[in-house]
Amino acid sequence: MSDTIKKIGVMTSGGDAPGMNAAIRSVVRACAYHNIECYGIYRGYEGMIEGDFVKMDARSVKGIINKGGTILKTARSEAFRTKEGRAKAHEQLLKAGIEAFVVIGGDGSFTGAMIFNQEYNFPVMGIPGTIDNDIFGTTHTLGYDTALNTVVEVIDKIRDTASSHNRLFFIEVMGRDVGHIALNVGIGAGAEEILIPEEDLGLDRLLESLRRSKQSGKSSSIVVVAEGDKIGKSVFELKDYVDENMSEYEVRVSVLGHLQRGGSPSCFDRVLASRMGVKAVESLLEGQSNFMVGLKNDIIDLTPFDQAVKGKSKINMELLRVSDIMSV
C-alpha cells in the first residue's frame, strides 16, 4: 500500500441513486481500516470549490447503509466546468490536506474528475452511481437494481387496476439514452410492448401489436416506454395517437418520474457499493488513479475514465428476443 496518501475525500455528484450512502460508508470504513483520514465533501464539486468538507470516521457512517439518497448531498456545478472553478477547488483540497478523492456519480461527474486529474495530476477514482445503468465498464451501476425492483412493484399495482377496467396503460420509466430499465422491467412485469431508444418500433407496428393482443383475448395491456424512446412522441402523444386509431382501448398514462430514484437500496446494491468502495480506496493507496470501479462477470475491475465516459453501454439483445416471445 502507498505511504504517500494520508487523506482521502469522498463525494456524491450528479443525480442521486440508491446505494450512494452504502458507497460513502464503504469508502469511509476502508479508509479507517487502512488508518487513512477521510473527509466527506458536501454537495459534490460545488462543495469542493467552497471547501465544504467534514472529517468522517467509521462511526460517522453508522445506520446509513439502508438509506436512499446521499447524506453528503449532491449538486450540479457550473463553476467546476470553468478553469477558475477547478483552480479554486484544487486550492481548497490542498488547504485541507486532502491528497486524493473518490467521486460517486455518473459520466458527467467522471468527466469533471478526468479533466481535474489532467490539470493537477490529482489522484481520483470513480464509483458509478446512477439508476440508468448507462455507463460503460460495469454491468451494474449503483441504484440500478433497486430501481428495477421499485418499478416492477409499481407496474404490478398498475396492472391490478388496468385489468379491473380493461385498460391500456402507457408507463414511462427513466432511461434517456438507454433502455435498460424499460427492457428489464417490461419483461419482469409482463408488459405487452416495450419501447426503448435502441429499437425504433414505429407507430404502425405498435398499433398492430396492440391489435394482436386484443385479438388473442387480452383485455388489458401494459406498454413500458423509456423516456428517450425513438418513436419521437411523448408518452401523452402516444396515448392520443392510440385513442384516435384504436377506439376499443381506454388508454391511461402513468409517468413514474422521480419515485424510481428513491427508496432503500436492495441487498444487491448494498453489497455492490461495499465492494466498490473498498476497491476505490485500495486502488488509490496502490498508486492507481483516473479509473472507474466497475463490476464485470462478478469481479470488481477498473476501467479508465476516458473509456467509461466515451464508451456506450449496450442493451442485451437476447432480452429483446425474450420480450417478443413473452408477449405472444
Image (cartoon, rainbow, N blue to C red):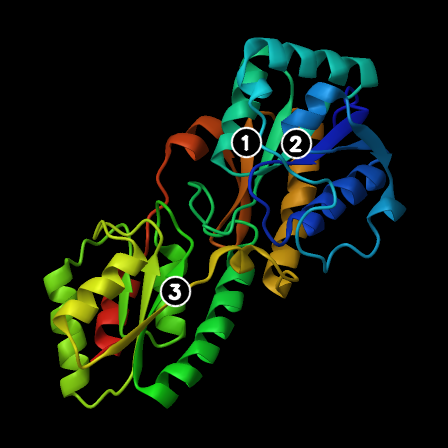
Give the alpha-carbon distance from disc 3 to disc 2, as whole Å. Answer: 31 Å
Front one among 179 and 303: 179
Q: Do the residues under discs 1 and 3 have CB atoms within 8 angstroms?
A: no
Which quarter of the figure has residue 168?
Answer: bottom left
Q: Is residue 217 above or below residue 327?
A: below
Give the alpha-carbon distance from disc 1 to disc 3, as whole Å. Answer: 26 Å
The residue carrying mark 3 is 184
Q: Do the residues under discs 1 and 2 have CB atoms within 8 angstroms?
A: yes
Residue at image position (49%, 31%) is 108
Mark 2 or mark 3, which is nearer the start of the sequence?
Answer: 2
The residue carrying mark 1 is 109
Give the crowd class for mark 1: few <14, some 14-19, many >=20 residues within 10 Å.
many
Marker disc for residue 269: none
Amino acid residing under circle 3: Asn
Q: Identify the element where label 1 is drawn.
A: helix
The residue carrying mark 2 is 44
Amino acid residing under circle 2: Gly
**Residue 127 spot, x, y in % from top left:** 59, 40
| Camera sees residue 239 | yes
